[in-house]
Image (tube, grey):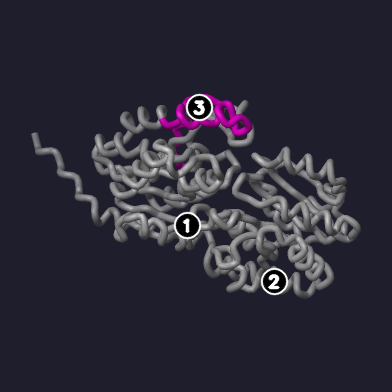
């Protein structure tokens, strides 16, 4: 029996889903599992890169599927990339999977569980879904797909079918689990496992000793930063408006690290509004992640309130590991706001409340002791709930329970 993990991206890619899958795969190999990963040959932020078709990462057998590589910038091209990955995946699963193998299907690209369902069923394998987000709900809430369209209704029906036929469906937050229960997904198949970060690789870095602060000329200013995907689900307008309110504060700097769908809008706003207090930097290598997170004194996180049951910004867990406070723009009763409030390690404001966000920033900038206290609380919350050891141990328990439900193979008769 082997574990087949499926996601479009895997190490050395630096996307959030790649980091989570890479962490889980490495942990499972360390616990004695035979692990195979099916991914694409591309990097999420550089479609020109072609990774090797076969690879071995720390004992993980990696099969990289040949697909188109139009990239994320052109929507029709992204759809073609999705389609070719789905087709290549179905064919490879038919060749690779065997009876009673476990296939863990992630959600990049969307509806992987639907594509995996038929070949997994035909080969007598077992389907487990790791729902890092929910499609087509995300698309509907972003206005990409309308609920009444036949294609959207069909996608919902197929997705739900694939969840009902899976042995286990793992969600990252309780709110998503509750939503799936409300859609009729059997309770016995639902599990909640929080996402995590590597608390050994990401530890608090003293701001005075952080080389990135020197390289980027941040000096001793109070740095307010966003690090990650500039995606559709995030509210950057409130961040930009707060920066505009604080443009005359020479002791406060804004730092946006990453890229994505909203990057052009952000660049245009910085240029058009003369926001010289904002620096833009590209996504940094994995080995500098602790320095990146530690270079920021107050991290910005956002999620459109309508998206709360369907996606969780995984960047939060790295921020907590780095021992830094968070300013969250989103639903005040949602998962992130509740965690920040419970852990006393940050503040939350509603989307559009740039004045409230500016008050949070100026209040912390003038109170170094509170900064330190909130940062210590952040790391304590991480150690209690979001470590890699805890998350992968939860997965280990789920898989061991599955093993108890899968019949033992019948040996071939003696000759």
Q: Residue at x 24, y 54 (%)?
A: 405
Examine the structure image and report whether residue 72 is included in the region drawn in magenta: yes
Disc with the residue nearer the chain's start (2 vs 3): 3
Residue at the extreme front = 148
The answer to which image quadrant residue 242 occupies is bottom right
User: With respect to residue 72, does 400 lie above or below?
Assistant: below
Q: Residues under labels 3 and 1: Cα distance?
A: 28 Å
Give 95 or 149, whichever is nearer the viewer.
Answer: 149
Q: Counting other residues with Cα less than 10 Å from the Cα at mark 1, is it few (<14), some (14-19), or many (20 or more)?
A: many
Counting from the top left corner in percent of width and height, residue 13 is at 58, 39
In percent of width and height, residue 126 lies at 29, 45
Question: To which residue does mark 2 refer?
Answer: 374
Q: Regarding mark 3 in the picture, which secondary structure is present there?
A: helix
Residue bearing the label numbered 3: 80
Q: CA distance from mark 2 to mark 3?
A: 45 Å
Q: Residues in magenta?
A: 59-86
The residue to which callout 1 is attached is 172
Q: Residue at x 39, y 56 (%)?
A: 180
């Amino acid at each position: 029996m082997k574990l087949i993990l499926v996601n479009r991206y895997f190490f050395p890619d630096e996307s959030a889903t790649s980091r989570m899958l890479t962490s889980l795969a490495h942990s499972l190999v360390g616990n004695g599992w035979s692990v195979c990963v099916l991914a694409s040959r591309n990097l999420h932020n550089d479609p020109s890169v072609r990774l090797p078709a076969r690879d071995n990462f720390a004992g993980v057998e990696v099969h990289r599927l040949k697909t188109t590589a139009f990239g994320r910038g052109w929507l029709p091209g992204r759809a073609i990339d999705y389609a070719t990955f789905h087709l290549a995946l179905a064919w490879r699963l038919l060749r690779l999977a065997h009876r009673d193998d476990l296939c863990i299907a992630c959600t990049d690209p969307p509806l992987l569980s639907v594509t995996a369902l038929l070949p997994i069923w035909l080969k007598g394998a077992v389907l487990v879904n790791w729902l890092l987000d929910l499609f087509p709900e995300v698309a509907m809430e972003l206005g990409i797909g309308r609920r009444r369209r036949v294609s959207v209704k069909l996608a919902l029906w197929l997705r739900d079918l694939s969840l009902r036929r899976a042995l286990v469906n793992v969600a990252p937050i309780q709110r998503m689990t509750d939503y799936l229960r409300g859609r009729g997904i059997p309770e016995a198949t639902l599990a909640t496992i929080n996402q995590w970060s590597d608390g050994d690789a990401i530890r608090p870095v003293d701001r005075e000793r952080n080389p990135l602060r020197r390289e980027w000329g941040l000096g001793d200013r109070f740095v307010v930063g966003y690090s990650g995907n500039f995606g559709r689900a995030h509210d950057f307008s409130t961040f930009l408006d707060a920066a505009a309110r604080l443009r005359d504060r020479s002791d406060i700097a804004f730092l946006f690290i990453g890229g994505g769908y909203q990057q052009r809008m952000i660049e245009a706003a910085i240029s058009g509004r003369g926001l010289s207090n904002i620096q833009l930097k590209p996504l940094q290598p994995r080995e500098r992640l602790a320095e990146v997170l530690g270079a920021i004194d107050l991290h910005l996180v956002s999620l459109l309130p309508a998206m709360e049951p369907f996606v969780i910004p995984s960047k939060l867990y790295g921020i907590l590991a780095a021992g830094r406070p968070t300013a969250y723009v989103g639903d005040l009763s949602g998962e992130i706001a509740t965690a920040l409030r419970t852990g006393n390690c940050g503040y939350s404001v509603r989307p559009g409340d740039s004045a409230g966000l500016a008050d949070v920033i100026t209040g912390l900038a003038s109170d170094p002791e509170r900064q330190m206290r909130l940062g210590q609380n952040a790391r304590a919350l991480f150690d209690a709930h979001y470590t890699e050891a805890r998350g992968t141990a939860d997965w280990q328990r789920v898989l061991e329970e599955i093993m108890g439900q899968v019949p033992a193979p019948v040996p071939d008769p003696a000759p």
